[in-house]
């Protein structure tokens, strides 16, 4: 299934009603999912989230409810259902099922990464590189000696050697970090209520 396939997009209010939780709780969870997992959303003219991909919501929340099996609300009792309500529910259900299976397939194929783990890794790598670069002033005497002996040419040569040494240290440290990393990540627990 391609990424440009239609997605079932629901409003925060509709999700809140379906799942039996407050709009504020849904809004809070959606903001977290957008920040951590970049789930598809539609925004209004002022940049506020107006609709959320239902498949992504359900995938990350670990919930799935067939819209055709929703309980009848008090306000709709006694009224005939809209002519296309069951067919629309089935159509959305099929798109939802396809979208969820696509997400699960990407997850199994290793094409999805956990945003929290990626952010932590990037931060750790940045600190390691900063630590190596921070040792650069320790080479001041060697660089000064190169300038005094051979001038600008000597400095260029010493800087080239120093850059090669730093690049090697960074590569060695990153390989060491990668070697100690687990091959798979544990399943992420849903901590939002």
Image: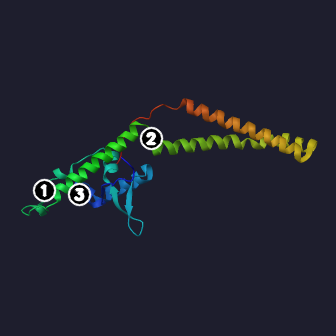
Residue 76 horizontal/vertical position (percent): 12, 62
The residue labelled by disc 3 is 17
Q: Is residue 31 above or below residue 130?
A: below
Q: Calculate the distance from the C-alpha at mark 2 to the C-alpha at mark 3.
A: 32 Å
Quadrant of residue 166 within the rendered picture: top right
Q: Is residue 7 above or below residue 78?
A: above
Label 2 secondary element: loop
Pick the front one: 157 or 172: 157
* Disc 2: CA contacts within 10 A as few (<14), some (14-19) or many (>=20): few
Label 1 secondary element: loop
**In the displayed structure image, the side of residue 8 where residue 48 appears, left or right:** right
Q: Is residue 19 visible?
A: no
Q: Is residue 45 above or below residue 3?
A: below
Label 3 secondary element: helix
The residue labelled by disc 2 is 111
Query: Among all residues in the image, which is located at the extreme left?
Result: 78
Pick the front one: 117 or 98: 98
Q: Residue at x 75, y 43 (%)?
A: 136
Q: Calculate the distance from the C-alpha at mark 1 to the C-alpha at mark 3.
A: 12 Å
| Closer to the eye: label 2 or 3 | 2
| Closer to the eye: label 1 or 2 | 2
* Disc 3: CA contacts within 10 A as few (<14), some (14-19) or many (>=20): few
Quadrant of residue 139 within the rendered picture: top right
The earlier-in-sequence mark between 2 and 3 is 3
Residue 81 horizontal/vertical position (percent): 12, 61
| Closer to the eye: label 1 or 3 | 1
* Disc 1: CA contacts within 10 A as few (<14), some (14-19) or many (>=20): few
**In the displayed structure image, the side of residue 64 where residue 70 appears, left or right:** left
Residue 72's label in the rendered image is 1
Q: Residue at x 65, y 42 (%)?
A: 129
**In the displayed structure image, the side of residue 122 where residue 171 appears, left or right:** right
Residue 158 horizontal/vertical position (percent): 83, 40
């Amino acid at each position: 299934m391609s990424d440009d396939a239609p997605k079932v997009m629901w409003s925060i209010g509709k999700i809140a009603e379906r799942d039996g939780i407050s709009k504020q709780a849904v809004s809070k969870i959606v903001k977290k999912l957008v920040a951590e997992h970049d789930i598809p959303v539609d925004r209004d003219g002022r940049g506020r989230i107006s609709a959320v991909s239902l498949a992504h919501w359900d995938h990350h929340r670990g919930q799935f409810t067939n819209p055709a099996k929703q309980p009848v609300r008090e306000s709709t009792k006694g009224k005939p259902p809209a002519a296309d309500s069951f067919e629309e529910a089935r159509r959305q259900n099929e798109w939802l099922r396809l979208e969820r299976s696509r997400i699960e397939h990407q997850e199994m194929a290793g094409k999805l990464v956990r945003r929290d783990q990626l952010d932590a890794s990037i931060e750790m790598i940045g600190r390691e590189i900063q630590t190596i670069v921070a040792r650069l002033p320790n080479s001041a005497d060697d660089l000064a000696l190169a300038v005094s002996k051979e001038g600008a040419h000597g400095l260029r040569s010493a800087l080239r050697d120093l850059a090669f040494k730093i690049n090697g240290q960074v590569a060695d440290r990153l390989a060491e970090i990668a070697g100690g990393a687990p091959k798979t990540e544990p399943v992420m627990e849903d901590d939002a209520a």
